[in-house]
Image: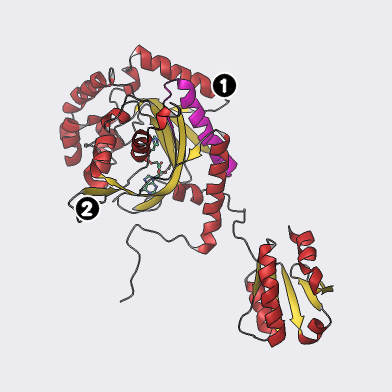
């Protein structure tokens, strides 16, 4: 039986990879321009990093993690997100001793056992950026500005930046109680999961897609009405800095984000071109995460972009595939050997060149050059080779000229690079 990929795990094929490389290159350029450095973290971590970091009573930890016991009996988990791992690395390597402020980004696959559908996979890629060590709301705005600049630079349009504040350790417990009291009266409307969430983590009911739960929560009190004056001040500053940067946003008091570590600022960038999974990116501030994973009291803020969703929104008229600059059609044994020698040099000169290894007819080689969308074809025959010459054909204009073989690289460079 043919072995197929696991459900929810995708191959990214060569005709798609140009888009991914384009996105990654732009992320690196924009983020590094904002002073961020790349960090690479393991794909596998101790399970408790996520259960404590993301929160025991979240969907991710309760039912979406790929967790297993290794041969030594340790419980390990494929990372469902990158923030907790980056915080762990910052603590473990005491990056704060160099400078208390760390601006880090990471690109790679994450794993969640969710029900696969368009825009939702079990292995998916994120581009994640985090700032550790700054409490000032200026950095909240800076991170959001960076995200929006990046998304615009890769060509995304019609995006909506949604903003909310979730309060902190001081004011959120009061809101939680208020929400619980409100929902107690409607508990008969809640699904089985939400009945449980009502006791363990009522805020998570906002994320439930079940219609009756959505109805139950429709006129629930808003977290933003319960935040303390310190949190409100922080939020006002974030908005002021966003306005200074000329960014438009809408306030979404129902956006609570699916991870428990958030405090104060929470944001998402959504695109209505995406269908039901409409968040391209999400993030927020998390001033208690470091303590949850056993560290110091360090504030943090960041976001993650979902790469599959981003790639699906790239402009349709842009070409991301790189075609060969040159195809060498060699006719005969000596020309093929010469083509091999030439190609090795051309690759060093930065010219993408292809040849036909099989010694096929000129017609079939031209057909292949056409299929590969090569811009030029060099036709190399026995007689011409003896004279040090070959025919260079422009596949776009169909014009052809005789050139000296030793000038090939120079000529191509002037035409292509
Ligand atoms: P998140 O909202 O869980 O946040 O994920 C961020 C983005 O990853 C989503 O907006 C979406 O584009 C993409 N994403 C999430 N799950 C899937 C999936 N199953 N399939 C495809 N794409 C998906 C976090 O992960 C936080 N760590 C973000 C963050 C960083 N907060 C602070 N710093």
Colouring style = secondary structure
- On-image quarter of the N terminus: bottom left
User: Residue at the location (27% across, 40% down)?
Assistant: 50
- Ligand 1 has an atom within 8 Å of the beta carbon of the residue at disc 1: no
* Residue placed most toward the observer, 16 or 295: 295
- On-image quarter of the C terminus: bottom right
* Residue placed most toward the observer, 203 or 56: 56
Task: Work out whether 199 lies above or below 349.
Answer: above
Task: Work out whether 393 lies above or below 334.
Answer: above
Residue 68 numbered mark, or none = 2
The x and y percentages for residue 207 are 30, 37
Whole-number angstrom distance, CA of label 1 to CA of label 2: 48 Å
In the image: residue 72, left or right of residue 79:
left
The x and y percentages for residue 140 are 46, 26
Magenta stretch holds residue 375 = no
Q: Quadrant of ligand 1?
A: top left
Q: Identify the magenta region.
A: 130-156
Dot 1 or dot 2: first in sequence order is 2
SS assignment for the magenta stretch, majority: helix
- Identify the secondary structure beneath mark 2: strand
Task: Work out whether 320 lies above or below 359.
Answer: above
The x and y percentages for residue 203 are 26, 30
* Residue for badge 1: 244
Q: Residues within 10 Å of mark 2 (few under 14, many from 20)?
A: few
Q: Residues within 10 Å of mark 1 (few under 14, many from 20)?
A: few
Magenta stretch holds residue 137 = yes
Is residue 374 visible to us here? Answer: no
Q: Quadrant of residue 358?
A: bottom right
In the image: residue 288, left or right of residue 183:
right
Q: Nearer the viewer, mark 1 or mark 2?
A: 2
The x and y percentages for residue 169 are 28, 21
């Amino acid at each position: 039986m043919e072995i197929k990929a696991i459900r929810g795990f995708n191959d990214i094929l060569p005709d798609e990879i140009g888009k991914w490389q384009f996105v990654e290159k732009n992320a690196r350029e924009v983020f590094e321009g904002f002073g961020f450095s790349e960090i690479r973290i393991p794909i596998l971590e101790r399970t408790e990093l996520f259960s404590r970091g993301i929160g025991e009573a979240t969907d991710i930890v309760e039912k979406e993690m790929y967790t297993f016991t290794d041969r030594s009996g340790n419980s390990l988990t494929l990372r469902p997100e990158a923030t907790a791992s980056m915080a762990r690395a910052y603590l473990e390597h005491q990056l704060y001793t160099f400078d208390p402020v760390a601006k880090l980004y990471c690109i790679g696959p994450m794993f969640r056992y969710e029900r696969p559908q368009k825009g939702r996979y079990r292995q998916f890629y994120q581009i994640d950026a985090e700032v550790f060590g700054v409490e000032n709301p200026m950095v909240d705005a800076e991170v959001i500005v960076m995200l929006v600049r990046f998304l615009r630079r890769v060509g995304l349009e019609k995006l909506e930046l949604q903003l909310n504040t979730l309060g902190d350790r001081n004011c959120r417990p009061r809101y939680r109680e208020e929400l619980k009291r409100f929902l107690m009266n409607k508990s008969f409307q809640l699904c089985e999961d939400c009945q449980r969430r009502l006791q363990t983590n009522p805020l998570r009911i906002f994320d439930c897609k079940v219609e009756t739960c959505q109805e139950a929560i429709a006129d629930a009190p808003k977290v933003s009405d319960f935040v303390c004056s310190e949190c409100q001040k922080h939020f006002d500053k974030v908005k002021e800095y966003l306005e200074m940067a000329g960014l438009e946003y809408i306030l979404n008091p129902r956006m609570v984000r699916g991870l428990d570590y958030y405090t104060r600022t929470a944001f998402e960038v959504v695109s209505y071109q995406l269908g039901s999974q409409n968040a391209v990116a999400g993030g927020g501030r998390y001033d208690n995460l470091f303590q949850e994973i056993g560290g110091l009291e360090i504030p943090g803020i960041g976001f993650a972009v979902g790469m599959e969703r981003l790639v699906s929104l790239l402009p349709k008229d842009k070409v991301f595939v790189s075609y060969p600059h040159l195809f060498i059609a060699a006719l005969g044994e000596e020309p093929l050997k010469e083509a091999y020698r030439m190609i090795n040099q051309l690759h060093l000169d930065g010219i993408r060149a292809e040849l036909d290894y099989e010694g096929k007819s000129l017609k079939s080689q031209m057909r292949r050059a056409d299929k590969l969308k090569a811009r030029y074809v060099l036709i190399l025959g026995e007689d011409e080779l003896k004279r040090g010459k070959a025919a260079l054909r422009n596949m776009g204009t169909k014009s052809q000229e005789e050139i000296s073989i030793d000038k090939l690289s120079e000529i191509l460079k002037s035409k292509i690079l």
